[in-house]
Image (cartoon, rainbow, N blue to C red):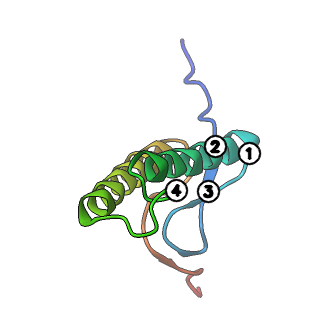
Amino acid sequence: MQTSPKKAIRFTPKCYGWWFKPVSWQGVLCILILLGLVFASAYANEIIMNDQPNAKEIIAFIIDTFLLIFTSSRFMEKYSDGKLQWRWGKNPQ
């Protein structure tokens, strides 16, 4: 009989708000990679280089950032011990 391997928990849901917080070094590394990718997107779309970027560059950066956050949220939910949802703190019971 095979036993299922224990799920590696790298993130835990935040007590207040939306998204996850890292609980292991792998989770921190994922957050740093995400920040690096957002910075690379800003550089590639010339948001950082120009004093006044045009609308096309801004829209491309916003779309890139949305896609990065969406895909990283799905990845983090897979390695989390909770569901991705808005939280208002602990329920008084």
The residue tagged with tag 3: helix, strand or loop? Answer: strand
Give the residue number, with chain letter if any, for mark 3: 12
The residue tagged with tag 2: helix, strand or loop? Answer: loop
Position of 71 relative to 93 (above/below): above
Query: Mark 2–mark 3 contact, CB under 8 Å?
Result: yes
Real-space CA distance between mark 1 and mark 3, rounded to the nearest whole angstrom: 10 Å
Work out whether residue 90 or residue 75 is closer to the camera in this orientation and state it.
Answer: 75
Real-space CA distance between mark 4 and mark 1, rounded to the nearest whole angstrom: 15 Å
Q: Quadrant of residue 29?
A: top right
Real-space CA distance between mark 2 and mark 3, rounded to the nearest whole angstrom: 8 Å
Give the residue number, with chain letter if any, for mark 1: 24
Please name the residue shown 62% across and 31% down the image. 6
Work out whether residue 84 or residue 34 is closer to the camera in this orientation and state it.
Answer: 34
Position of 86 relative to 66 (above/below): below
- Tell me which numbered mark, 4 or 1, is placed earlier along the sequence: 1
Position of 86 relative to 32 (above/below): below
Work out whether residue 50 or residue 39 is closer to the camera in this orientation and state it.
Answer: 50
